[in-house]
Image (cartoon, grey):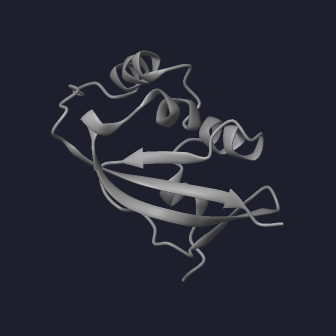
Amino acid sequence: MARIDADTLLPAPHIQQAVTAGRISQLHRGNPYAEEGDTFDIDGETFEVVEVSERKLGDLTDEDAQAEGSEDLEAYRERLNHAHDDFEWDDSATVYRHRFERVE
C-alpha cells in the first residue's frame, strides 16, 4: 500500500476532474499502474485503489464503459480510437482494470 501520484494512474486533467465529479470510478490501462490499497489525491480529496484486475478487452461491458465515463461500450471504443493514434480494438488484448473509491 503506497501513496501514488494521481498522474501515474489518471493520465489527463479531464480524467482527474471526472473522477472528482464522480463520473469515473475505474480506468482500464495496458499495464498495472497501481496496486490494491494504493491511494492518490486530487484537489485535496483522497481516493483508494480498491481493485486491480487483469481482463481482456472483449470482456468489457456497457457497465465498464459507463464507469469510465462513456455512455456505452461502443462510445468507449470510439473514445479509445480517438485518444490513441494507433489503437485497434482486439478482444483478446490484455488490459488492467483499476477501480477506485473516494476515501471519506
Report which quarter residue 13 is drawn in: top right
Q: Quadrant location of the C terminus?
A: bottom right
In this image, 85 relative to 82: left or right? left
Q: Quadrant location of the N terminus?
A: bottom right
Depth check, front residue: 99 or 2: 99
How many numbered callouts?
0
The spot of residue 8 in percent (x, y) is 49, 59
88 versus 60 height, above or below: above
2 versus 84 height, above or below: below
In the rendered image, the residue lying farthest to the bottom is 1
In this image, 70 relative to 76: left or right? right
Report which quarter residue 45 is drawn in: bottom right
Who's the residue at 68% across and 37% down the image?
Answer: 18
The spot of residue 100 in percent (x, y) is 60, 58
Who's the residue at 82% across and 62% down the image?
Answer: 44
The spot of residue 35 in percent (x, y) is 45, 72
In this image, 13 relative to 81: left or right? right
The spot of residue 61 in percent (x, y) is 41, 31
Who's the residue at 60% across and 77% down the image?
Answer: 3
